[in-house]
Every structure is written in C-alpha cells, then in structure tokens.
Image: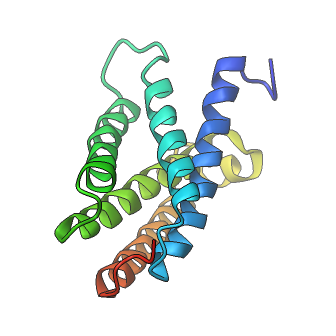
C-alpha cells in the first residue's frame, strides 16, 4: 500500500496529477498562442493513460466514472486527431483547443470529486458530495473553464511552432 492505495491505484493517481499539471502548463502556452509541444504531449499521454487505467478497475455496473472515461476517450481522440493527423489546420486548431481543454476540465472535475471523498477536511464539508461546498467548488471550476474556453475562442493568432 502506498498512501493507503494499491500500487495500481497510486500509479493511476500519479498519472492523473501529472496530466493535470502538464495540462495547465500547456494551457498557459495555448492562451498565448504557443503550442508548447513537450507539455502538450505529456498532457495528452498521461491523460490518455489515466483514462485507460481507469477502465482496468473492476466494475459491475456503469458508473459516473465509466461515463466520464468514455467521454474523455472521445474528446481525447478528437484532440489527438486534430493535432497529429490534421496538424491544427483551419478549424482543427479550434477542435484541438476545445477538446484538450474539455479533457483537462474532466480530469480536474474528477480530482475535485476525489478530493472531497478522500481528504478529511473536505469530506467533512461534503461527505456525500451533494452538499453546497462541493457544488460551489464544481461550479467555480466550470466557470473558470468556461472563461478559459472563451479566451481560447477569442484568440485569432495561430500557434507559434
């Protein structure tokens, strides 16, 4: 056990945290018109690995986590296709930015869910995940990502490679 997690769960969590951190670093570049290729690759690879390892956990019914995983898979496929097959040409640049941003949002959403479930002080504020502190955290996250999406949409300058 590592921090109370199985080695596989720990690996999954580390992948997720790396993906989130790399995603925000890459996002900083995207907002300034820079692809930041290395950080973008780290974000995409670790986020895809997070989704894939999430499907390995045992499940008997479709859960919100499975639904998030399926949505993330589709969104990440669009981002990878737009970046590596369409080379961000024309509308594919926007498709990449919005799909990558949405993938980062989903991963961060799950981070907040997990934090409220696993971190004592947060869990005390919202033990079932239906209490106002949890809702406020998720609404704030959504507002931040909508604002980021708006900023990305307003950018008319192509990436500086």
The one nearer the camera, 35 or 118, is: 35
> How many numbered circles does the render carry?
0
Quarter of the view holding residue 38: bottom right
**Residue drawn where x is 51% and y is 56% of the image:** 40
Measuring from the top left, give residue 161's x and y in whole percent: 45, 71
- Residue placed farthest to the left in the image? 91
The one nearer the camera, 121 or 109, is: 109
Residue 6 can be seen, yes or no = no
**Residue drawn where x is 30% and y is 24% of the image:** 62
Q: Is residue 141 left or right of residue 1?
A: left
- Residue 142's place in the image compared with 150, above or below, is above
Measuring from the top left, give residue 87's x and y in whole percent: 29, 59
- Residue 145's place in the image compared with 16, above or below, is below
Residue 51 can be seen, yes or no = yes
**Residue drawn where x is 32% and y is 17% of the image:** 61
Measuring from the top left, give residue 11's x and y in whole percent: 66, 28
Q: Is residue 96 left or right of residue 148?
A: left
Measuring from the top left, give residue 135's x and y in whole percent: 47, 61
- Residue placed farthest to the front in the image? 161
Looking at the figure, which quarter contains the N terminus? top right
């Amino acid at each position: 056990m590592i921090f109370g997690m199985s080695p596989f769960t720990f690996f999954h969590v580390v992948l997720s945290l790396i993906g989130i951190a790399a995603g925000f670093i890459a996002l900083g570049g995207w907002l300034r018109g820079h692809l930041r290729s290395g950080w973008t690759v780290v974000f995409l690879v670790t986020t895809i690995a997070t989704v894939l390892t999430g499907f390995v956990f045992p499940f008997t019914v479709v859960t919100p986590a499975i639904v998030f995983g399926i949505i993330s898979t589709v969104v990440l496929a669009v981002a990878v296709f737009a970046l590596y097959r369409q080379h961000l040409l024309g509308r594919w640049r926007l498709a990449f930015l919005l799909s990558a941003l949405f993938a980062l949002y989903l991963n961060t959403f799950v981070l907040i869910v997990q934090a409220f479930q696993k971190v004592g002080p947060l869990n005390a504020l919202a033990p079932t995940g239906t209490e106002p502190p949890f809702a406020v955290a998720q609404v704030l996250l959504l507002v931040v990502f909508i604002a980021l999406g708006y900023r990305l949409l307003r950018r008319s300058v192509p990436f500086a490679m």
